[in-house]
Amino acid sequence: LGDVYKRQVLESLSKLIIRRMDRVVVVGEFMKRKIKRDILQGMDSEHIITIHNWADGEKIKVMRGEKEKNFLKEEWGLEGKFIVSYSGNIGDLHEFDTIISAAEDLEEQGWKSICFVFIGEGIKKGYIERKVKEKGLNNILFFTFQPREVLKYSLGLADVSLVTLEKGFEGMVVPSKIYGILASGKPVIAVVGGESEITEIIRKGRCGEVVKIGDCKGLSEKIINYYSNHKKCYQEGMSGRKYFEENYDRKIATEKYIKVIEEILGSLF
């Protein structure tokens, strides 16, 4: 009863705050729709402003293939591998069983050149490591978080990158790793439970594929398709970079925040 009461109090406070603020910034259109539907319920929503999270396109740039050597590939023993990368927080809001099962499927099929690389830390990392050990998989590797100045290289390792979101968190969470992936010029495969900001970005940006949670065969097939079609990798990666530059570069978001702050300050005087 105590936990239920606390949750109800927090929900009531959240609704009160969102309804009474001069401006509320959300990080995605799905989040905005959810607030309008579940909290405002027909009340005025003009004060809800969407400003997406971002990456710094000056620091995270597209690696230029053989012309620009990626020192991490040699350092981590990944030369000659087709790399499927997950980079960032390995947390509760992300789903990994589909990825593990796809890796198992690809290993059983004999795709020795395809390698899954996890770069980061988080509460679910230990779970993935145990599953990998139980299944005896040799095609999943783990590396720790890399310094910010190395992001260009760690994100640039990927031939295709993964983003995941557990079912039920659509409109509540936007995995910000998507913006760094787009900046790096890599195609994206999203493993998700339903429509979300991520699926919309991928479709509008024409920069990847979407797989339902649990569809490990579908994920395997899409990875093989990328492996077999380097042109697809390049075209979707470049499409993602272009979409990033038009919508999610740091300077775009900071300009929007400046505008919101100026509007609020202007209304006070």
Image (tube, helix red, strand yellow):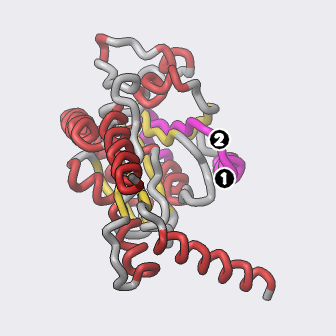
| Residue at x-position 37% and y-position 58% | 28
Q: Position of residue 150 (x, y in %)?
A: 51, 21
Q: Position of residue 8 (x, y in %)?
A: 66, 83
Q: Secondary structure at mark 1?
A: loop
Q: Nearer the viewer, residue 14 or 239?
A: 14
In this picture, is 146 found above or below 225?
A: above
Q: Residues within 10 Å of mark 2 (few under 14, many from 20)?
A: some
| Residue at x-position 36% and y-position 65% | 47
Task: Return the residue at label 2.
Answer: 121
Residue bounds of the magenta highlight: 106-133
The amino acid beneath tag 1 is Lys
Q: Nearer the viewer, residue 117 or 249?
A: 249
Q: Is residue 160 a member of the stretch shown in magenta?
A: no
Residue farthest to the front, as pictured: 269
Residue 228 in view here: no
| Residue at x-position 65% and y-position 75% | 10
The amino acid beneath tag 2 is Glu
Q: Position of residue 151 (x, y in %)?
A: 48, 26
How much space separates mark 1 and mark 2, taking CA atoms?
8 Å
Residue 110 in view here: yes
Task: Return the residue at label 1.
Answer: 124
Residue farthest to the right, as pictured: 2
In this picture, is 59 found above or below 264?
A: above
